[in-house]
Amino acid sequence: MACSRPAAVLAGALAALLLLAAGCTTPTDSKPGPATPSAMTGPESSAPAPKPAPVVVAKPASITGSEETSTMFDNFTAYVAAIDGQPVAAGRTGWNTPLPLPAGPRRLTVAFIRGVFTAQADVNFPARPEAVYQLKFATDAQIFGKSSYCEFWIVDTATGEKVLAPTRVPLAKADTAK
């Protein structure tokens, strides 16, 4: 029995439909798994992985103390004794040595000494990257004076701006008997 031409075309189309339908179904016993790189197509497979954001490390600021000389008795010296609770090795003798300050909020222990008179305070201020600061002071410490207070503040040496308002603390008399 010979097939007529329209019947052959119809049989071919039916076979193509069956093949297409069979390719679009998934067996019920298979579980979906992770996509493999060879199965991925489209723009997301050809795009390079995003680069991580660069880490920017701010350059530190620096701070020094200050000193007023006295011809008759001991000099008046204000210096940084600790940064964020870590003692500074230089102490009074390194009052003019620039100390590095990481940028951000800082807690400084500042100190004053003149002869037997001393004062100390903890102060907080935000250090800006690469800024240069100086610890300043005012006091009434005199050998024959009232000697009651010391006031500390910090200035930005580039602008002269006070970055820390004055903090007043009482003077203490160091124990000289040892």
Image (spheres, rainbow, N blue to C red):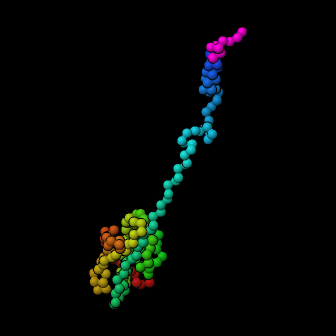
117 or 151, nearer to the observer: 151
Which residue does the image show at 46% across and 78% down from the upper left?
90
**On the picture, is 105 further left or further right than 22?**
left
Which residue does the image show at 64% across and 29% down from the upper left?
30
Residue 120 in view here: no
**On the picture, is 4 further left or further right than 116?**
right
Say which quarter of the image contains residue 168: bottom left
Residue at the outermost front position = 5
What is the x, y in percent for residue 73?
Answer: 35, 88
Say which quarter of the image contains residue 127: bottom left
24 or 114, nearer to the observer: 24
Q: How many marks?
A: 0
32 or 153, nearer to the observer: 32
**On the picture, is 68 further left or further right than 21?**
left
Say which quarter of the image contains residue 155: bottom left
Give the residues in magenta. 1-9
Which residue does the image show at 55% across and 39% down from the upper left?
42
Quarter of the figure with the C terminus: bottom left
127 shown above or below 117: above
Residue 126 in view here: yes
Residue at the outermost right position = 1
What is the x, y in percent for residue 59?
Answer: 45, 67
What is the x, y in percent for residue 124?
Answer: 37, 66
Which residue does the image show at 35% across and 77% down from the upper left?
172
66 or 119, nearer to the observer: 66
